[in-house]
Structure formats: structure tokens, C-alpha cells
Amino acid sequence: MEKTVITYELLYDALRMEKQRVELQKLDPEFYINITRYIEEKKDILQSQENKDSVFTNTEVQKTRKQIENIQKILKELYERREAKIIELALIATKSNHTNTADKESMLKEERTFYEDALYLLSNYRDNTLLSILSGKEIITKEEPKGLKEENMPPTTTKQLKFLASVPTFVGTDLNVYGPFEKENLAEIPLDVANLLIKTKKAIENEST
């Protein structure tokens, strides 16, 4: 199968289709990997332009910087729209106890992992909360440990994790590509994704950090 060549037009069309249609759109299986390489190529071009000594350099540099900025904005919106659709699909599957095969086939490998993790968390929360209410049982919630006040704590955006299982490549909320990871691997992961991996028992926070 011939690999899809990423272009600005292709990325824009992918976002347009995702915005126009309710269902999750199919993308090339290696879309996130290819788009990351595409951005890196653009950054290499920018660096080359910045190193040139020419009267046209400033115009070229500004043009390339703007293009990279637009590419990142489009990718962020595309990612967030697909993310919202996948969460909605997980909610529907939780309520109906059924996953639509066609919808799952439209997910990228990284998105299937996210879908399964979201489905697991939603299903468990639904079982532990809704079923407890319906059966008249007390809902037990974990108390937050007492410690330093949050405002006195330095802000953290990542956690170093130790992986307990293999995890395929995925795109973090910072739009960087992470993975794949094997059991026992250590890695710095965006906080929200790290917490999800910990909750689904795919990783633990590295105690040595």
C-alpha cells in the first residue's frame, strides 16, 4: 500500500471533513507519524532559511513560521474533534453495552487504545456509581490525601512513568508523538495522559523521580 504524502492541503481537507461529518473519518493508519515527520521537515526548512544570508531571508522565514503555526493549529483542532467523537462513542457504547464495528475501524491505532481506556473508565464509573444508587448502596469515594496546598506547589505538566505493559505510539496533548513503549520502559508523559495510563494499570509513576 502506497504511503500517503502529507501536504498542507491534505491536512486542511482532513479537518474540513471531520467538521462537516458527524461520524469519525478514516485517516491513513500512520497519519500521526507522518504528520510529525512533515512538521519536522518544515522546521528543518525554517532552520535552513534562518541560516541563509540573503535579502529575501526575512520574508521566507516569516512565511515558513506562519505555515508551521497554521499546520499546528489545524492538527490541534483535528485532534480535539476526533477526541470528542471518540469519547462520545465510548459513552454510547457504555450505555448500550455495544461497540459499533464501523466506528472502531475508523479509529487510528493510537485512538483505539484511547477508546478502550475511556470505555473501561466510563464503564467502571457507571457500574460503581449508577448501579450503587439503583441498588440503594452507599457510594464510597476516596478522600484526597492531606498535604501541601496546591497553590504552594510548583505546576507540573508531566509525570515519569514506568510501563507495566506494551503501549503503542500515541500523540499527547502537547501534540508530540510518544511511544511505542514496552514493559519496564521509563518515559515523561503529559499529565492527563499519564493519569489515564496509571488508572488503566498500564503504567505506574516512577518512584525514583
Image (cartoon, helix red, strand yellow):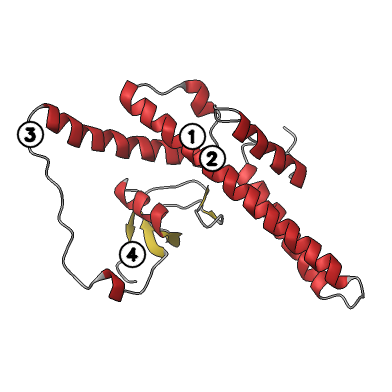
Residue 171 disc label: none
Type of amino acid at the residue the image marks with label 3:
Lys
Residue at 28% from the left image edge and 33% from the top image edge: 123
Residue at 62% from the left image edge and 48% from the top image edge: 75
Q: CA distance from mark 1 to mark 2?
A: 6 Å
Q: Residue 56: percent from the left, percent from the top?
A: 91, 70
Residue picked out by circle 3? 137
Q: Element at badge 1?
A: helix
Question: Decide: marks 2, 3 in contact (CB < 8 A)?
Answer: no
Type of amino acid at the residue the image marks with label 4:
Asn
Which image quarter is the C terminus in? Answer: bottom left
Residue picked out by circle 2? 81
Q: Element at badge 3?
A: loop
Q: Earlier in the sequence, mark 3 or mark 4?
A: 3
Residue picked out by circle 4? 206
Q: Element at badge 4?
A: loop
Question: Decide: marks 3, 4 in contact (CB < 8 A)?
Answer: no
Residue picked out by circle 1? 85
Examine the rendered structure and indicate whether residue 50 appears above or below residue 162. below
Question: Decide: marks 1, 2 in contact (CB < 8 A)?
Answer: yes
- Asked whether, in this view, residue 16 is left or right of residue 159, the answer is right
Label 1: how many Cα within 10 Å (few below 14, some 14–19, many 20+): some
Q: Earlier in the sequence, mark 2 or mark 3?
A: 2
Q: CA distance from mark 4 to mark 2?
A: 32 Å
- Asked whether, in this view, residue 41 is left or right of residue 208, the answer is right
